[in-house]
Amino acid sequence: MTTRYRVEYALKSHRRDQLIEWIKGLLAVPFVLHSQPTAVFEPQRGTTDQMATIAHRRYGEIMRDVEELINDHIAHQQAGTHERSKLKMLVPSVGMFFTPLYLHDAFVYQDNRRFISSRRFVPPSFNDIRLILNTSQVMSLTRGGPIELITFDGDVTLYDDGESLTEDNPVIPRILALMTKGTKIGIVTAAGYTDARRYYERLHGLLDAIYASNLPSTYKQNLIILGGESNYLFKFSEGEPDRLKFVPRKEWLLDDMVAWQDADITELLDVAEIALKDCITTMRLEAQILRKERAVGIIPLPGKKLFREQLEETVLVAQKILEISPVGRRLPFCAFNGGNDVFVDIGDKSWGVRACQHFFACVPTPISAIPIHGRSASVDAAVIPNPDPTSIAGAKTLHVGDQFLSAGANDFKARLACTTAWIANPAETVALLDEMCELDEALSRKIK
Ligand code: IMP
Ligand code: MG
């Protein structure tokens, strides 16, 4: 039992999302009790249809109960006692919620697409629940008034790993449609480059489409790139050859980031580099160190590929060593598995998203750029008040990314700054934006 416990929980806990696993466990009970695997032997459809109706009702009831537990947790958050909520006791790793989640309605929506209740052999899965959570978040954001800022991760979210955002990418018209409504867009990526050309190479399809669009100039400026997690800010600029203008740090750094000392940055990267070198030696990795101004990583030697186990071990070693180092307690950092590389960056995406929220809130919005789909702040969602008027609220911001495991994943930290959607590939990002548009239009029709 000890061995099994260690393998299942102690050693693999970083590869599980506890909230999703817990919901999966709750839904497994009605699945076991009501699924009818033997119905495949029966000629009439009646049993299967009846089973689907019962399962749909029972799954829906559970999702509504979880929704209520989250509302209770939010009430505790607002009273400053979230550590004592019932949900916290049931799922100790659960964090803060920026908005309520419409889990029941989202389940109905996804069940109509994925026919979860009609399955007789495969219970509600991790992916079913991940997608229900995404839909519930989008429902909450659209019902709660206009989303002011959407931040996107780059690799795997907007384009395939290591690829570029080319002109044929279906996400482009969706992002343009959002920008037409006045929504602000941030691309918060780990890819850390100091010059605009490198970002233009990676993102030229989108940047050229914005340039060629008939969006007013003020709307075009609603796109920024926050590179190296939270280290380099570029804003869209029509006059630049690469369509991007570097914004000096003094113009956008948050007060807490100004306190990050150069000596600490060097020290943290030195500690990380030693840890990474040690992994190369210990595991005989066919990899080399890449040291940058604000990051250090390992990349495979030309033509080589690193195994998942090697990448995960390297991340966890670097993470642990940095966590116990004095400098790692003074300075935020992010160690993550990039699919075929491992990087340790200064800062993380919580700082990246917050910097976007602050940057856009400080740029005065011209009257003509006030979102045309604007509604009052709260239609029927209890949006959590914004504690900081100099920043776009977490409840009005959505970060879309693919890396949400608790260790070795760099989108995870964005959860500290805003609401999030966890996608598995660029096609899911497109589907999420379509879902958002569909829900927004349905709501507009209802209001009229
Ligand atoms: P993301 O998914 O958009 O956050 O991009 C992650 C990828 O960017 C990594 O897997 C690396 O291949 C690449 N990358 C390039 N420069 C850096 C850097 O300075 N830090 C971290 N990742 C980098
Ligand atoms: Mg990614």
Image (tube, rainbow, N blue to C red):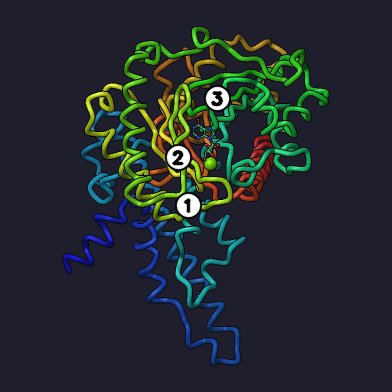
* Disc 2 from disc 3: Cα separation: 22 Å
* Disc 1 from disc 3: Cα separation: 27 Å
Q: Quadrant of residue 152?
A: top right
Compared with residue 211, is residue 175 higher up or lower down, i.e. above or below?
Answer: below
Residue at image coords 54%, 72%: 118
Q: Which mark is residue 253?
A: none
* Disc 2 from disc 1: Cα separation: 10 Å
From the viewer's perspective, is the residue at label 1 or at label 3 nearer? 1
- Front position in the image: 441 or 321: 321
Which of pointers 2 and 3 lies earlier in the amino acid sequence?
3
Q: Are marks 2 and 3 in contact (CB under 8 Å)?
A: no
Circle 1 crowding by C-alpha within 10 Å: few under 14, some 14–19, many from 20: some
The residue identified by callout 3 is 226
Measured as percent of width and height from the top left, residue 375 is found at: 61, 27
Measured as percent of width and height from the top left, residue 90 is found at: 25, 51
Circle 3 crowding by C-alpha within 10 Å: few under 14, some 14–19, many from 20: many
Residue farthest toward the left in the current orientation of the protein: 2
Which of pointers 1 and 3 lies earlier in the amino acid sequence?
3
Q: Secondary structure at mark 1?
A: loop
- Front position in the image: 73 or 263: 263
Amino acid residing under circle 2:
Ile
Which of pointers 2 and 1 lies earlier in the amino acid sequence?
2
Measured as percent of width and height from the top left, residue 7 is found at: 26, 62
Q: Are marks 2 and 1 in contact (CB under 8 Å)?
A: yes
Amino acid residing under circle 1:
Leu
The residue identified by callout 2 is 298
Q: Could one spot residue 372 in this view of the protein?
A: yes
Q: What is the quadrant of the N terminus in the image?
A: bottom left
Q: Secondary structure at mark 2?
A: strand
Measured as percent of width and height from the top left, residue 96 is found at: 35, 35
Compared with residue 259, is residue 113 higher up or lower down, i.e. above or below?
Answer: below
